[in-house]
Amino acid sequence: MPIVLKSRREVEMMRKAGRIAHDILQKMRLAAVVGITTAELDELARVELEKAGATSPSKNFPTYKPGEGFPGYTCISINEEVVHGIPGPRVLKEGDVVKIDLALQLNGYCADTATTVPIGKINARAQKLLDVTCDTLQLAIANIKPGRKWSDIARLMQWNVEKNGFSVVREFVGHGVGRTMHEEPKVPNFVTPEQLRGDFKLKTGTTIAVEPMVVMGKRDVVLLDDHWTVVTQDRLAAAHFEHTIAVTDDGVEVLTDGRDSTIV
C-alpha cells in the first residue's frame, strides 16, 4: 500500500484531533495516582472522548481471537507490560511505571499518543528508563526532515537506547496515521535488514506515529493469555512514549503536543 501524503488542511484536521488527545492524556496522567484503578482511568478517557465528540479506534479493535475486540477505550500497561494492557480492576501502587496509550478519531481524522507515568517515587533505574525513552522520541523528532530516509532516524533511536544500557522492542513499531489509526508505512525504532527492505523517504505531508518502546532488560516479549497484553519475557520494566507528527517543508510538526490548530 502506498504512503498517503496529507494536505495542509488534513494536517490541521489531525492537529485538532491531536489537541484533544493531548488534553485527555494529560488528564489521565494527573489522575494516575496511588489507589486508582486502570478501569477508572479508562472511564475518564471515555467521558472526555464523548464530551469532545471523538471516538476511540482502540475500542473493539479486532484481535486474533474471533469475536473478541479490545475491551478498553485506551491501553494501560503497568511495569513489565509493554503495550496493549487492558484496563480493569488493578489498583495503581507506589513505584509502578504506567504506560497510557490513547488514540482517537475526530471528524474523520486520527491522532495517536502515549506517555509513561511514574506512580509516586520510582527507583533510579526506572527513572532513567523513562528519561531515555522520552529523550529517544525527542531525538527522532529533532532529526526528521524531508528527504531523509527513516532508517537514518531509526538508527539514531536504537543507538541512543542501547548506549544507555537498555533495549528496543522489535515486535512492535510506529505507523502511519491519518484517516485511520494504522496506515502505511511501518515506522521502526531500530534497524535490521528486514526493516531496511521497507525503508522509506520522508516527504512533506507524511504523517506518522513515532513511538519508541524501550525495556530495562532483554528485548524479548511474550503475549499473555488475554490475547492482548504484551510483557517483557524477563519481567523487567518497560517505557513507551508516542507523538503523531507531520513532515513539513521545514522539518516537522508535532500534532499531539497540545497546540491549537492554525486553521479554523
Image (cartoon, rainbow, N blue to C red):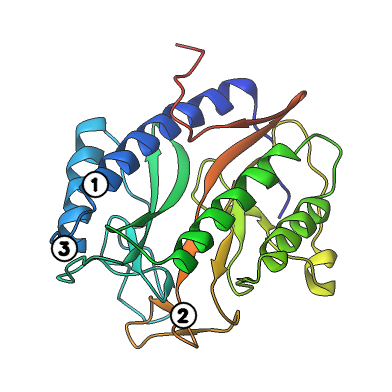
Q: Which mark is residue 236?
A: 2
Q: Circle 2 — which element?
A: loop
The C terminus: image quadrant: top left
Q: Residues within 10 Å of mark 1 (few under 14, many from 20)?
A: many
Left or right: residue 124 versus residue 93 is right
* Residue 13 x/y as whole percent: 49, 26
| x, y percent for residue 101 | 40, 55
Q: Residue at x 56, y 66 (%)?
A: 214
Mark pair 1, 3: CA separation: 13 Å
| Secondary structure type for disc 1 | helix
**Residue position marked by numbered label 3 in the rendering:** 37
User: Front-most of 181 and 250?
Assistant: 250
Q: Secondary structure at mark 3?
A: loop
> Which circle's residue, 2 or 3, is located before the other in the chain?
3
- In the image, what residue type sits under mark 1? Ala
The x, y position of residue 125, in whole percent, is 49, 68
From the image, tell me which residue sits under label 1.
Answer: 45
Marks 1, 2: nearer the viewer: 2
